[in-house]
Image (cartoon, rainbow, N blue to C red):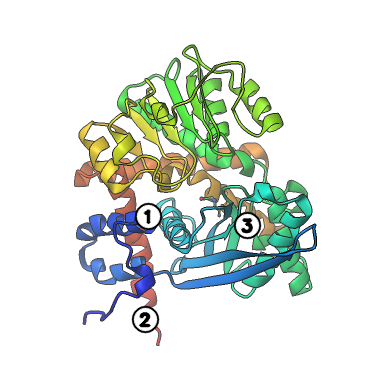
Amino acid sequence: MSIQHEIPSYLSSHGIGPWGDYLEQIDRVTPYLGPLARWVETMKRPKRILIVDVPIERDNGTIAHFEGYRVQHNTSRGPGKGGVRFHQDVTLSEVMALSAWMTVKNAAVNVPYGGAKGGIRVDPKTLSPGELQRMTRRYTSEINIIIGPNKDIPAPDVNTNEQIMAWMMDTYSMNQGSTASGVVTGKPISLGGSLGRREATGRGVFVVGCEAAVKRGLDIKGARVAVQGFGNVGGIAARLFSEAGAKVVAVQDHVSTVVRESGLDVVALQEYVLANGSVAGFQGGEEIADRALFWATDCDILIPAALEQQINVDTAHTIRAKIILEGANGPTTPAADDILHDKGVLIVPDVIANAGGVTVSYFEWVQDFSSFFWTEDEINLRLTRIMREAFTSVWQLAEEKKVSLRTAAFIMACTRVLQAREMRGLYP
Ligand code: GLU
């Protein structure tokens, strides 16, 4: 029996934006799914979409309204899981794509979650601390009906952090009438957060980067690294690479680009960014005005760790790196994937490369449920083991099927999700 369907209008964005990229990635993997391909439409439709109005009173007495979203893409393998993004360019279709990539990521590293994502279309830099708190709390109240420790567990993403998670946890708990630490991850340690969570995504990028370097015969000592995005992912990954002896020769953030042939002092740059909000004006390197030049940096390892679609048909041609580690979600378009494949560039895809964050989120959630907390060494050891295992099994599958690491990761993940889908069966 085949499943009958028509594509709902809001889902038909093939070729456009991150959701279009995601659909294309699913189409590319479908021929490898065998009989499970019968269920593949599941991957192309989010299970549940909630759009909420988030009104707040500004400090000046006016009322502002923001657009908020929470998308639960899939819950076949467990509760929804994924971050919340505050950014002025957030759209429903972006959040849909990010939620779908969470489904694939969680299955690829085999943590027992589905995929979800949330966001508010706002530039948080335009809000006072009080306004930011009121917006976060109102958003949490609005999505309260679909989140919960066993339903859907938010976490930090672009422009959200431990403080935002603390407000979300508190708001949910006040509505429930009891403290529910497992409703979000990425919390402060004092509220049931996990050691190592803040660094986990960057650490995971570093771990798979070392594995990829071995495959390419590249020595990390002396390797040249370029990083786009210098926040929680790019900043930490840059630090770990430079501690391992690599030279971080270029860093680009949302404002500027700094380069230094002999390697930037990453710790000094981190301190500078903490104090000044951006790499712009950093004296320990040379600032370059043309943002596009960043992609042409003469480097061995390139780490996109900012937003989607940065590596596209315009930038892919200029890339000189041997290895790309996708710290961001969806940084490479399918067309750029093809260009880089032809150039022989090794891409470790987002759904593996940046999965360290959600992996330690999983550890945090398990620790909250058992109220028993692990040491940082234990967490980093388990994280490293999961990242290496995921990399190795995806590498083997890629060799076996003669496909890219992205296609292999998607084959592995879609197979896990769709097997669960099939075993559970359709209800009613
Ligand atoms: N926002 C992160 C991601 O894109 C982490 C999600 C989580 O920990 O749930 O993977």
Q: Which residue is mark 1?
A: 17
Say which label, 3 or 2, has the lower sequence index. 3
Contact flag, marks 1 and 2 (Cβ < 8 Å): no
Query: How many other residues sit within 10 Å of disc 1, few (<14), some (14-19) or many (≥20)?
Result: some
Mark in the foreground, 1 or 3: 1
Say which label, 1 or 3, has the lower sequence index. 1
Rounded to the nearest angstrom, the CA distance separating label 3 from label 2 is: 29 Å
Type of amino acid under label 3? Trp
Type of amino acid under label 2? Leu
Rounded to the nearest angstrom, the CA distance separating label 1 from label 3 is: 32 Å
Q: Is residue 293 toward the left or the right of residue 141 in the image?
A: left
Q: Nearer the viewer, residue 62 or 169?
A: 62
- Residue 367 makes an appearance in the image: yes
Q: Nearer the viewer, residue 226 or 392?
A: 226
Question: Looking at the rendering, which quadrant does residue 85 occupy?
Answer: bottom right
Asked whether mark 1 and ligand 1 are closer than 8 Å, the reply comes as: no
Asked whether mark 2 and ligand 1 are closer than 8 Å, the reply comes as: no
Which dot marks residue 365? 3
Q: Position of residue 370 (x, y in %)?
A: 68, 59
On the rendered image, what quadrant is the C terminus found in?
bottom left
Q: Which residue is mark 2?
A: 426
Q: Residue at x 50, y 39 (%)?
A: 204
Q: Residue at x 46, y 13 (%)?
A: 261
On the rendered image, what quadrant is the N terminus found in?
bottom left
Rounded to the nearest angstrom, the CA distance separating label 1 from label 2 is: 31 Å
At numbered mark 2, what does the secondary structure look like: helix, strand or loop?
A: loop
At numbered mark 3, what does the secondary structure look like: helix, strand or loop?
A: helix
Q: Nearer the viewer, residue 425 or 288?
A: 288
